Image (spheres, rainbow, N blue to C red):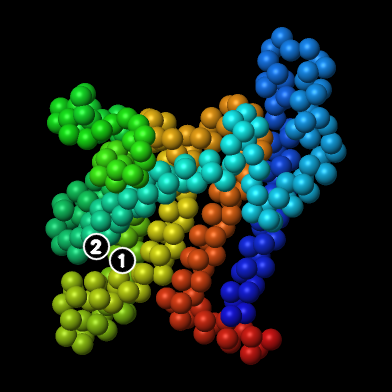
Amino acid sequence: MRFVIRRLLLFVVALFGISIVVFAALRILPGDVASIMAGINAPASRVAQLREQLGLNRPLIAQYFDWMGALVTGDFGTSILTGRSVTSLIGARAAITFPLIILGLLIAMVIGLPLGCAAVLARSPRVRAAFHVLAIIGGSVPALWGGLLLILLFGKGVGLVGILPSQGFPLDGWGKPGSAILSLVLPALTVGIIVGASLMRYTRATLGDLSSSGYIDMARSCGMTRTQAVLNVGLRLAMPQLVSVIGLTFASMITGVMVIENLFALPGIGNGLVTDVGNRDLIAVQSELFLLAAFFLGIGLIVDVLHRILDPRLKSASSVAEVNA
């Protein structure tokens, strides 16, 4: 419990620091929201009026505390350009981005974990070399190029085997779950193949180190085959590191899908954030960036707690350190 409390306190302090960085960074960007809203040929009086309405003429410290006070109450503000609640905007976009990331991560795990184990268990040097080359090729493919290749292969209307939609998301959203899932298959495959190759390399490296350790020798001396020892003992020992990698990969995929969402015309968080930055919608951008940072930190907090649960050595080391102190 003390460990969790310390991590939560660090989480709050980090969020406070990130809020300052996000607010300050957006205020030093060139351009003015009021000028954009008023138009190119708008008189200065109209621009000044808009600045007053939006509160942009107030001191920066006052603007910051107004924003933070609203965040504490769960109010993420209103989009300056669209007039919609930022909460509703983020909710609509997250309903596309998070299913895409979850589906992509599942594909990556289905690809990466079994192939990584197979690469360790393979006895032939040629087979191991083939797995190594496959991991390098899969991880080095740019997301944009890989997505275009999948569209040319499977995109409906343009692909050689046109069976999957390659552009957009259903207007009814998840009201038609079948159409919604089909529209995410190609983007998720693009993400999953690339991330799966990286996960395969890490699984192979982690299990490869453990396969020659004393733990595997002890398991084999108890009657296990090499395959049983690696899968039952080695994979269990590697699980804390794999959980950390999977958790951090899940968090990093939030920004990684920006290119994918633009390529497949998906109105998700990444696509919307790029649009809001281009339109200088400060209220929406700063709330979106703050929530993304909170998500990153939250995933890191969950990974730390899971790592401690899965690896009892960390708990034992912490207990010894507290006793010595």
Secondary element type, mark 1 = helix
Q: Amino acid at mark 1?
A: Leu
Question: Is 264 located above or below residue 252 in the figure?
Answer: above
Q: Is mark 2 in CB contact (under 8 Å) with mark 1?
A: yes
Q: Secondary structure at mark 2?
A: helix
Q: Position of residue 54 (x, y in %)?
A: 75, 33
Distance, label 2 to label 1, CA atoms, is 7 Å
Q: Residues within 10 Å of mark 2 (few under 14, many from 20)?
A: many
Q: Which residue is mark 2?
A: 117
Q: Residue at x 74, y 40 (%)?
A: 24
Residue annotated with mark 1:
207
* Residue 142 horizontal/vertical position (percent): 36, 35
The image quadrant of residue 13 is bottom right
> Which residue is at 50% across, 60% downward?
299
Q: Is 223 drawn above or below residue 175 in the view shown?
A: below
Q: Is residue 129 left or right of residue 183?
A: left
Q: Residue at x 32, y 74 (%)?
A: 236
- Number of numbered discs overlaid on the protein picture: 2
Residue 246, can we see it?
A: yes
